Image (cartoon, rainbow, N blue to C red):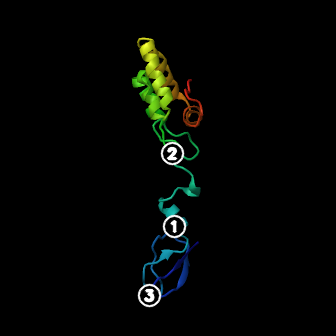
Amino acid sequence: MITYRCPKCGLEFSSTHGIFSPRCPACGQICESQNQTFSQEQQGNVPPYGQPQYAYGPGAEPGVFDVGPSGKSRGIAGLLGILLGYLGIHYFYMEKITAGIICIILSIATCGLWSIITLIQGIVILTMRQSDFEKKYIYTTSTFPFF
């Protein structure tokens, strides 16, 4: 049951119907619900119980290119590792500047063979869970997080 209050005459009334903007029975003024969050949840504006809504429902793992709590996407990091990993671009994206510089030095020292390792690392990043990605690459205190 939803309680409404008329802004014009002050009459309080309730309705069990799914009406989002009913009219006051006394003066005919359109009224707002007293319980705004319930009304917004019914309209679909707010996810129920404050849970995040992913493509496969609440509690499901976010997609590869969804942004995690840190603001970093493992899909973007993985693609950067596959395509430009020999330059350490995926580490620069994850704000691990020292690791990016180490990647550049290793690419020069190994004449480009380091790119095979970063290709594998990019694939691993794409296949891991978002929480594991955040823990291993974003929130770690390690200077050079590797596999």
Residue at 45% over, 79% down? 23
The three-letter code of the residue at mark 1 reads Ser
Badge 1 vs badge 3, beta-carbon distance below 8 Å: no
For disc 2, the marked residue is 54
Residue 146 position by quadrant: top right
Residue at 52% over, 42% down? 70
Going from N to C along the chain, the mark reached first, 2 or 3, is: 3
The three-letter code of the residue at mark 3 reads Cys
Q: Secondary structure beneath disc 2?
A: loop
Going from N to C along the chain, the mark reached first, 1 or 3, is: 3
The one nearer the camera, 45 or 132, is 132
Going from N to C along the chain, the mark reached first, 2 or 1, is: 1
The reply to whether residue 126 is visible in this rendering is no
Compared with residue 32, is residue 51 higher up or lower down, i.e. above or below?
above
Compared with residue 16, is residue 104 higher up or lower down, i.e. above or below?
above
Please state the total of marks drawn on the protein image.
3
Badge 2 vs badge 3, beta-carbon distance below 8 Å: no
The one nearer the camera, 23 or 38, is 38
Residue at 57% over, 55% down? 50
Residue at 47% over, 17% down? 106
Q: Secondary structure beneath disc 1?
A: helix
For disc 1, the marked residue is 39
